[in-house]
Image (cartoon, rainbow, N blue to C red):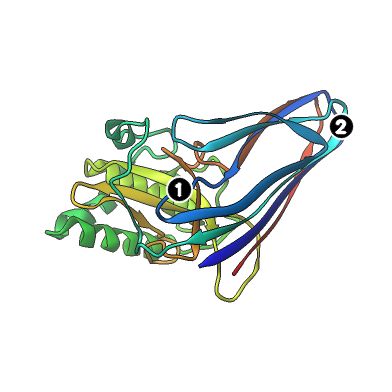
Amino acid sequence: MQLHVTHTTRYAYDAPVIYGLQKTRLRPVASHMQSVVDWDLTVTGGKIECSYLDHHGNQTDLVSITPEGDAVEITARGTIITENTHGVFGKVYGRVPLYLLRMPTTTTEAGPKIRAFASTLDKHDDMLTGLHALSAAILEAVPYESGHTAADTTAEEALSGGKGVCQDHAQIFIAAARLAGLPARYVSGYLMMDDQVDQDASHAWAEVHLDTLGWVGFDVSNGISPDERYIRIALGRDAKEASPIEGMRMGTSDESMIVSLQVQQ
């Protein structure tokens, strides 16, 4: 499937920014699941200082804000051809060892509620079946609804709150899978929705490593494994490490952000 993406993030400040730097992970990496036809990253109100591959293999750009500027706009735009592998990314490995992906992070540390959820996996002889059951159980316990969690909400907090978004679903799933001794990671990217071109945010899902299949994806929010409608952008141990944009600035200004995203065939 050929998909076209336009993703613009605009930051505005109520006072000039002395210094600001954004770390962006907005460039897809080619794989057997996707081919990059064309892709471009443009910046208004700043410039790309450097580009590199991070330890997860993510294409990363450092974007500086023009000194004394009051706004910066970053647009990722391009075309990707995707393949449907039924969620199986396979036995593809990078610099990060599997044992590191079994270890919790601050936001994926399992508390008592997640520990109880992880017992779902023990009820199935086949781990793949158990993981699909875990995904369904998480969505039932935490229905998708925005406005109840934030970027720094932990998996345990989201499960306790009973409502969340794709970031929360993925991190709960990752925390539970790691309790079972499985390497798990967070994937950020895009999803073409069947009935909607304009979207409010990018998407996220989880991947778990099985000895038989390698990496397998689970989109808890939609109850499926990623197919040809998905574009992979970045990987991480949690949402922070795979965040499309994160940054810092010097000064006392307040910040507002507007996101515009279109994903279409």
**Can you name the residue that lies furthest to the bottom here?**
195
Which quadrant holds residue 24?
top right
Label 1 crowd bin: few (<14), some (14–19), many (20+), radius 10 Å: many
- Left of 43 or right of it: where is 32? left
Q: Residue at x 43, y 60 (%)?
A: 142
Tag of residue 69? 2
Q: Nearer the viewer, residue 154 or 12?
A: 12
Q: Is residue 203 visible?
A: no
Q: Which residue is mark 1?
A: 187
For the residue marked with disc 1, what is the amino acid? Val
Q: Return the disc, 2 or 1, that comes first in the chain's sequence.
A: 2
Q: Position of residue 136 (x, y in %)?
A: 33, 64
Report which quarter residue 121 is drawn in.
Answer: bottom left
Viewer-nearest residue: 96 or 170: 96
Indicate left or right for 104 with 8 as reference. left
SS of the residue under disc 2: strand
